[in-house]
Image: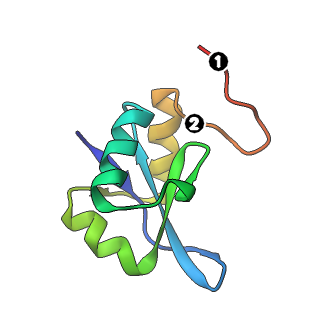
Amino acid sequence: MTVYIDPPDWPGHGRMWSHLVSDVSYDELQAFADGLGVPRRAFERDHYDIPSHRYADVVAAGAVEVSSREVVRLLTASGLRRPKGREPQSG
C-alpha cells in the first residue's frame, strides 16, 4: 500500500492543509485514513484534506511525501482524479 501526501501549503478555515491520495484505489486511501482516525468528512472528491498539525503523523504512518504537482499527476495517471465541477463517472 502506497499513499501520498503533499506539503501543507493550502490555506482554509484558518489552517494550512495537505492532500492525501492513493494512486491505486479509493478503498486503499480509505483504509489508510481509517487507520489514522481521519474522519470521513475530510474526504473531498479524490483526496483527504489533512491539517498541517497531522502531517508528521501521516508521514510517520507511511505516506510518501511528494509535491502538489505530483499529487495531481498521480491522480490523473491512475484515473482517480475528480476535478471540481465534474461528476464522478459510474462504473
In the image, residue 53 sits, relative to residue 79, either above or below, namely below
At label 1, counting other C-alpha atoms closer than 10 Å, the crowd grade (few under 14, some 14-19, many 20 or more) is few
In the image, residue 81 sits, relative to residue 71, either above or below, namely above
The three-letter code of the residue at mark 2 reads: Arg
- How many dots with numbers? 2
The three-letter code of the residue at mark 1 reads: Ser
Farthest top residue? 91
Residue 29 in picture, x, y percent from top left: 38, 43
Q: Nearer the viewer, residue 62 or 69?
A: 62
Query: Which quadrant is home to the N terminus?
Result: top left
**Which numbered tag is attached to residue 81?**
2
Residue 11 in picture, x, y percent from top left: 62, 77
- Residue at which label 1 appears: 90
Residue at position x 46%, y 49% in the image: 71
In the image, residue 20 sits, relative to residue 91, either above or below, namely below
Colour setting: rainbow
Question: Marks 2 and 1, Cα distance to the nearest angstrom?
Answer: 14 Å
